[in-house]
Image: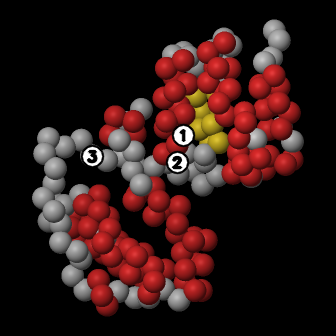
Amino acid sequence: RTASPAYSSYHAVACSPAAADPREFLRSHAELLPELPMHAATHPPGPVLLIGTGLTMFDVALSIAELQPKARILALSRRGLVAQSHRVLVAPPAPRARPRGIGSWPRTALGLLRAVREEVEQAALRGVDWREVVTSLRGDTSALWRGLPPRERARFLARLRPFWEIHRHRAAPQTGQG
């Protein structure tokens, strides 16, 4: 079988050491992206490996599944994480007040992690889902971030950011279930 030019270019670059950083690969080879759906439509179904498990992965996987319903899709995460889903609700949840005492939460990455976990645990005792706690923090995240010293911001980015992102930036319920 003859590979399309887009596939050949993609394969040659994706297998090179320069492709170690997927973001760099996409920045330097953006011209390939429009042709990838065409490749999926013109080649027989086969396994597909997606690098990254963020929200974009769901969109790409759904697009591939639409073009190749029998394709086996595997998504690879360097941390083994995938975006959490929103809940399926009949009606939107009642607005949740911001956490009490948030103004006095510790100004360290670990302190904020512990405070959020404590808030989630207390909310669970009252039958409130963790998602509502995370949503209640929306109005305060900028102030919490600004309150962290530079060293703690760096610590958050290095250690906690991926966990925050999969809980804060959630997939649609229908998307995240499959």
What kind of residue is marked 2? Gly
Q: Crowdedness of circle 3 by 10 Å Cα count: few (<14), some, many (20+)?
A: some
Q: Nearer the viewer, mark 1 or mark 3?
A: 1
Residue 178 falls in which quadrant of the image?
top left
Determine which residue is flagged by label 3: 87
Return the disc, 1 or 3, that comes first in the chain's sequence: 1
Tag 1's secondary structure? helix
Q: Crowdedness of circle 2 by 10 Å Cα count: few (<14), some, many (20+)?
A: many
Query: Which residue is drawn at the image coordinates 33% and 76% (left, top)?
Result: 140
What kind of residue is marked 3? Arg
Question: In which quadrant will I find the N terminus?
Answer: top right
Is disc 2 in contact with disc 1, using a CB cutoff of under 8 Å?
yes
Label annotation for residue 29: none
Label annotation for residue 54: 2
Distance between mark 2 and mark 1 Cα atoms = 5 Å
How many numbered circles does the render carry?
Answer: 3
What kind of residue is marked 1? Met
Tag 2's secondary structure? loop
Query: Residue 171: where, in percent of width, then height?
Result: 39, 45
Query: Which residue is drawn at the image coordinates 54% and 40% (left, top)?
Result: 57
